[in-house]
Image (cartoon, rainbow, N blue to C red):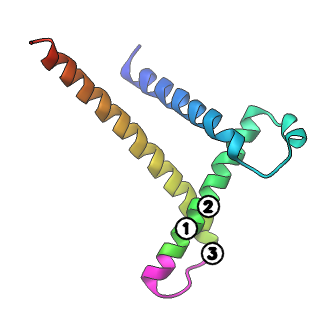
Amino acid sequence: MNKGTRNFTTLILSVTCLLLLVSPYTGAQSNEAKRGESFLDKATTFINQAANRLGKWMVKAVNKMVGREVASGLRVPLGYLGVLTIALLAFGAIEMARKVIWVIVGVGGHY
């Protein structure tokens, strides 16, 4: 398995695990309404809600920095940008931790 395929597989597994862990806590619908939804519906709803909430927070932060009201239409694009940034930072941290673990294993093998 080459590095690109391994990274893509890691990405898919990480996102799937995250969605499975957080999905019971998203939305205010009843269980009867959620039974008819597919996994893809739940995943996109979760990502959309996360982007909206993060975007709302980011617009408030920008408003405080600028000192005036910024267009509220930027809430969703800023939210998706924030979600992507968090995902990239998380995967970078995972990759760095993997390298640190291999260094520890390598050093530990010499003793």
The three-letter amino acid code for the residue at tag 3 is Ser
Residue identifier under label 2: 53
Q: In which quarter of the image is residue 96?
A: top left
The three-letter amino acid code for the residue at tag 1 is Trp
> Residue 56: percent from the left, percent from the top?
59, 67
Residue reaching furthest to the left: 111
Q: Are marks 2 and 1 in contact (CB under 8 Å)?
A: yes
Q: In this view, does 48 lie to the left or right of 108?
A: right
Residue reaching furthest to the front: 111
The answer to which of marks 1 and 3 sits earlier in the sequence is: 1
The answer to which of marks 2 and 3 sits earlier in the sequence is: 2
Residues in magenta, as a range: 62-71
- Which circle marks residue 57 in the picture? 1
- Which circle marks residue 72 in the picture? 3
Q: Is mark 1 on a helix, strand or loop?
A: helix
Q: Quadrant of residue 110?
A: top left
